[in-house]
Amino acid sequence: MASKSTSKEDIKYEDAIAELEAIVNQLSEGNVPLDKSLQLYSRGVELTKLCEKKLKEVEQKISILNKETNLEEPFLEEEIYE
Amino acid sequence: MFLFETVTELNNYVNDLLSDDNELSSLSVSGEISGFKKYPSGHCYFSIKDDESVVSCVMFSTNAYRLDFVPTDGMLVNVSGKAGIYSKTGKYQLYISSMSVKGKGNLHEQYEMLFKKLTVEGLFDYSHKVKLPLLPKQIGIISSSEGAVIHDIVLTLKRRNPHFSIILYPCAVQGDDCPIQVRAGIDYFSKRNDIDVIIIARGGGSFEDLFGFNDEKLARAIYSCKIPIISAIGHEVDHTICDYVSDLRAATPTAAAELVLPRLSDLETGLYNLSYSLDQAATRKLESEMKRLNMLRNHKALYSPMFNVTIQLEKLRGLKRQLLSFENNFYNAHIVSLESLKNYLNVSFFDVLNAKKFEFYSKIDRIESMSPLKVLARGYSFVTDNQGKAVSDINSISIGDNIDITLSNGTASAQVIGVNENYGE
């Protein structure tokens, strides 16, 4: 929770979720001053958006290493029967 | 002399002789491998020899398939099989059904020994296991590029969550090359720096088939790998050293795919719930602050600055009144109780006095009625001896004794002149 940078920050998904959970718990307890509450809320919204983005960030890629060239090559998808 | 029609017939005859021989039809011998050659068909041809002699050997693919090591020239081995003639060359050779490295013990013994050794060393300790990331960006897979395993994994991943990226490091999953190649795969992924988790996978097979995953160097490579490793070797019932030392064991390759990547829908639901809770908590907080604000805004104190002073004064007066009435009540209550206590004391004192008086007089009456003087007045008298003691027994006096007889109004001195005791009274 130390870093309150922009949404482009490099935070792991599980860490972002854990921070979001902590914020929800803190807000629910109700004894947080209003100013702090608003701060927490906006951080929570930021984290939510970040997580949403992270969920779909990875594009599907199935590759195989060519040991001779040491290059990744697409793994023949037509071979994967569905 | 027996005439063989053909050479084939002759060779077949010799072959039959060898086959019928008890010792040669089931034999075991040890020696050093030389000229080992494995053909694409899977059949292996080689010789075994000692210092003086050599014998040709053939091991057909059906048997060679079960070998748990790669035979190389110079290796000392035990072979079992039978002897026969290879008709085409007329050479006698051994048909090998099984072969093991001399002095190494069987695979199960090797497995047990390694398992114990690594357990003692702590390679299987849970404290050393690395936690898997919740959402891996890139997954490294070490497995065969052929067969069902990689297909199963990809299909399962696709079904659960389309957002994944995998790199397959193709490797042998059987035989002596297997542990070496798997280790190379771990090394490769470790150096990449963009792999979040590694899966080592292989389909089902016999204990011998899976033995490549019971390799000590491989176990140590897995142990020291910084990236979390999921091991999915064989089926549910199979346990390899690789499974034990990995950070997580999956029963099957499909299970490994399920463990490595959460379902997208589950993740979305979780995130939605959290964001809903966030909104709710913030809304509640705002509402309660608004309520407080409204209450304050409508408060009289904000209308008139004197309001507060008036309230305090009013309170003060009230307290004063309470104090006064308390003081009065206290005083009155004490006066009343003092009076009643006094009365009570008086009453009870005279009662006791009268009762005692009455008791005293009635006792005097009783004492008077028992006085001996009263009895004497009725004509009775009493007798005392010369020592003044009352005489009540006739035996205590004798004739000649001086006695006093007391009457109600005087005393007569007398001498006893006779004693008569009454009997039978």
Image (cartoon, coloured by chain):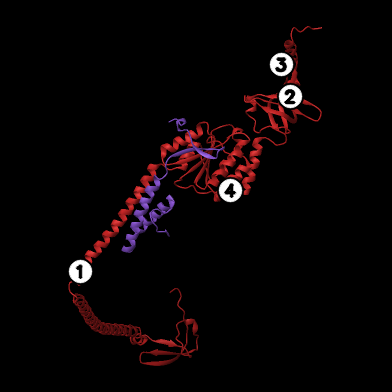
Chain colours: A purple, B red
* Contact check, label 3 and label 1, Cβ < 8 Å: no
Q: Do marks 3 and 1 share a subunit?
A: yes
Residue at mark 2 to residue at mark 3: CA–CA distance: 14 Å
| Structural crowding at the residue carrying mark 1, measured as other residues with C-alpha within 10 Å and reported as few (<14), some (14–19) or many (≥20) | few
Which residue, given by chain and number where applicable, does mark 1 sit on?
A: B299
Residue at mark 2 to residue at mark 1: CA–CA distance: 111 Å
Q: Amino acid at mark 4?
A: Ser
Q: Earlier in the sequence, mark 2 or mark 3?
A: 2
Residue B56 numbered mark, or none: 2
For disc 2, the chain is: B
| Structural crowding at the residue carrying mark 2, measured as other residues with C-alpha within 10 Å and reported as few (<14), some (14–19) or many (≥20) | some
Q: Earlier in the sequence, mark 2 or mark 4?
A: 2
Residue at mark 2 to residue at mark 4: CA–CA distance: 45 Å
For disc 3, the chain is: B
Of B40 and A66, the residue lying toward us: A66
Q: Secondary structure at mark 2?
A: strand
Where is residue B324 shown, x and y percent of the image? 22, 81
Q: Secondary structure at mark 1?
A: loop
Q: Do marks 3 and 4 share a subunit?
A: yes
Q: Is residue B300 above or below residue B341?
A: above
Q: Left or right of B290: which side holds B245?
A: right
Where is residue B163 shown, x and y percent of the image? 41, 41
Q: Earlier in the sequence, mark 4 or mark 1?
A: 4
Q: Amino acid at mark 1?
A: His
Residue ranking furthest to the left? B303
Q: In which quarter of the view is residue B25 placed?
A: top right
Residue B224 numbered mark, or none: 4
Q: Amino acid at mark 2?
A: Ser
Q: Do marks 2 and 3 share a subunit?
A: yes
Which residue, given by chain and number where applicable, does mark 3 sit on?
A: B88
Of B51 and B282, the residue lying toward us: B51
Where is residue B213 shown, x and y percent of the image? 59, 38
